[in-house]
Image: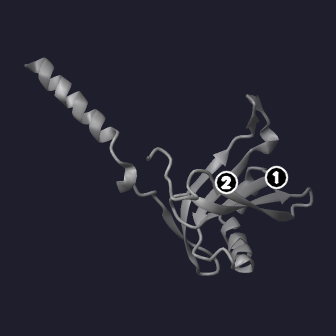
Amino acid sequence: MPLRAVSVSILLIFCVACGDASGFRQPTLEQRLVSGTVIQVISCRLVWGIEHGERHAKQDSFALEYVTSLSPSARDELDREVLDVFELIRPVSEQWGFSTASVAAFPSPERSGKYDVFTFSRSTDGRWSVSRTAANVFNTESGHKPGHS
């Protein structure tokens, strides 16, 4: 009998762990910007400069991902919002001596579909410049979620 109880328990844990992920909600943190706008931060992390197993310390940076409520057609407004969002990581990037940082603006916390990545670069005189790149999370454009059939 104890073997059967253990087997049933393991099976139950397996079924729950492999269940449908539609009940999962991406955690976010609300953050008020200098402008007064409140955004949802999806992720803020230290990114190591590593490529093909080789360490490149000069490529270390901070990366922040957030949810924007702006429509994709509001490009100028998004550019201004991202500059405010960048202020959340600019001081720590400078304190750590980093010359790059990135901010990604997603339309939803689920990180699906099209989004924009803003790469910030700091010149030797300390001034920051920014470039924008359009990106896309693959396998979500059609509404298909990875891992679901």
Cα–Cα span, label 1 and label 2: 12 Å
The mark total stands at: 2
Residue 143 x, y percent position in the rendering = 51, 59
Residue ID at (76%, 34%): 51
Up-down relation of residue 35 to residue 119 (above or below): below
> Hey, which residue is sitting farthest left in the picture?
1
Residue under the image location 35 percent in, 55 percent down = 23
Residue drawn 28% across the image and 37% down it:
15
Amino acid at circle 1: Ser
In the rendered image, which quarter is residue 118 located in?
Answer: bottom right
* Front-most of residues 16 and 101: 16
Of the two numbered discs 1 and 2 on the same chain, state the one appearing first in sequence: 2
Classify mark 1: helix, strand or loop: loop
Residue 83 to residue 110: above or below: below
Specify the label residue 63 is tagged with.
2
Query: Which residue in the protein does label 1 denote?
Result: 99
Image point (79%, 53%), residue name: 100
Q: For residue 126, which quarter of the picture?
A: bottom right
Q: Identity of the amino acid at label 2?
A: Ala
Left or right placement of residue 140 versus residue 127 in this view: left
- Residue at the far right in the pictured view: 125
Residue 10, relative to residue 22: is it above or below?
A: above
Q: Position of residue 99 (x, y in %)?
A: 82, 52
SS of the residue under disc 2:
strand
Indicate the quadrant where residue 112 lies. Answer: bottom right
- As drawn, is 144 to the left or to the right of 92? left
